[in-house]
Image (cartoon, grey):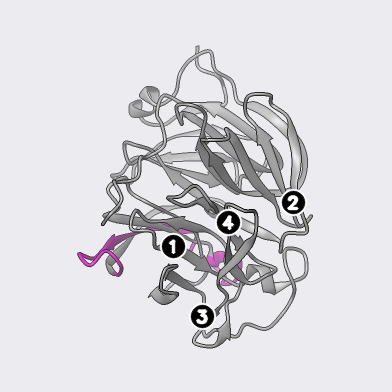
Amino acid sequence: MLSESFVVEDPRFLRLVMGNIAVEKLFTGTRWAEGPAYFPAGRHLIWSDIPNNRLMRYDEPSGSVSVFEQVCGHQNGHTVDREGRLIACEQGGRCVSRIEFDGSRTVLADRYEGRRLNSPNDVVVKSDGSIWFSDPTYGIDGDYEGYKAPSEQSGSYLFRLVPSTDELAIVASDFVRPNGLAFSPDESLLYVADSGVTHIENGPRHIRRLVVAADGKSIASSTVFATAEVGFFDGFRVDSAGNVWTSADDGVHCYAPDGTRLGRILIPEVVGNVEFGGLKRNRLYICGTTSLYAVFLNTRAAVRPARAV
Ligand code: MG
């Protein structure tokens, strides 16, 4: 029997979820959970508690939770690069940073054309090693999730960074507030949330689908993929079949690649982001404001294409 946490809106959803499985609450005690990143080699999950300016760590085999880092530049979104290093969006540090194998921190990008970034929000690494991130103003709009400051940029942009050369380029400048982002399994598409409704009445509250150009580093076109009925979409992940599992006000929404909403996973808190983990990458970790949740699904994380040479 299917848990009442699952709401089936299209028969295809029944193939992605399983009966006799419940959403588990793994931890509670954060002010605003965000930025989950799973490390397969260590079987642990790192996630952000943005207002408390700390990173949390969930150890999968033991189920224990600890503070991974306290005072961390109000980090928000995270990802793991091809080498297995943590890539962080620091809203307080107004930069994208990387933790090296020796534990030291490297700032990868903090300025564009000499002016400070707003407050990097979410990030993904492409198979060619390039780092794509959004740079809305949330971390400088107030002191709750960063440090209040005027923007030095002329907008909220989507950036592409090549860490080996420090090349930083705007790939999209037509978002009100770009937010979560993820590639399709073959990296031909890039999904990017626009949560601009936070700043403009009736502003965007949708996920756009951007077609990656043949050069692999620019955008050929974009269309609206999914629109939130309430609230807005924040972070999300794509599974191996190309389904988009996105955060929403009432939990997690699952969209097929054709844009049909297949179903929802109800969570009793606003969800900010999700991440696939587990030995088989078939466990969805869910950051829900004060708590970390998880649920096993009948699908798994998209596998990145082989490294481009
Ligand atoms: Mg976000």
Residue tagged by mark 3? Answer: 155
**Residue extending farthest front:** 102
Q: Quadrant of ligand 1?
A: bottom right
Image coordinates of residue 214 in percent, x first then y, are 20, 64
State the separation of the CA atoms marked 3 and 1: 19 Å
Query: What span is in magenta?
Result: 196-218
The residue located at (52%, 85%) in the rendering is: 154
Residue at which label 1 appears: 131
* Number of the front mark, 4 or 3: 4
Q: Which residue is mark 4?
A: 100
Q: Decide which of tag 3 and tag 1 comes sooner along the chain.
A: 1
Amino acid type at circle 2 is: Glu
The residue carrying pointer 1 sits among few (fewer than 14), some (14 to 19) or many (20 or more) residues within 10 Å by Cα, namely: many
Query: Mark 4: which amino acid?
Result: Glu
In contact (CB < 8 Å): disc 3 and disc 2: no
In the image, residue 301 above or below residue 140: above
Which numbered disc, 3 or 1, marks the residue closer to the eye? 1
Q: Which mark is residue 69?
A: 2
Badge 4 or badge 3: first in the primary sequence: 4
Q: Residues within 10 Å of mark 2 (few under 14, many from 20)?
A: few
Q: Residues within 10 Å of mark 4 (few under 14, many from 20)?
A: some
Distance from Cα at disc 2 to Cα at disc 4: 15 Å
Identity of the residue drawn at 23% across and 67% down: 215
Residue 173 in view of the camera: no
Residue 111 position in % (x across, y down):
55, 80
Q: Secondary structure at mark 3?
A: loop
Q: CA distance from mark 3 to mark 2?
A: 31 Å
* Residue 146 in the figure: left or right of residue 20: right
Q: Secondary structure at mark 4?
A: loop
**Mark toward the start of the polypeptide (4 vs 1):** 4
N-terminal-most mark, 2 or 4: 2
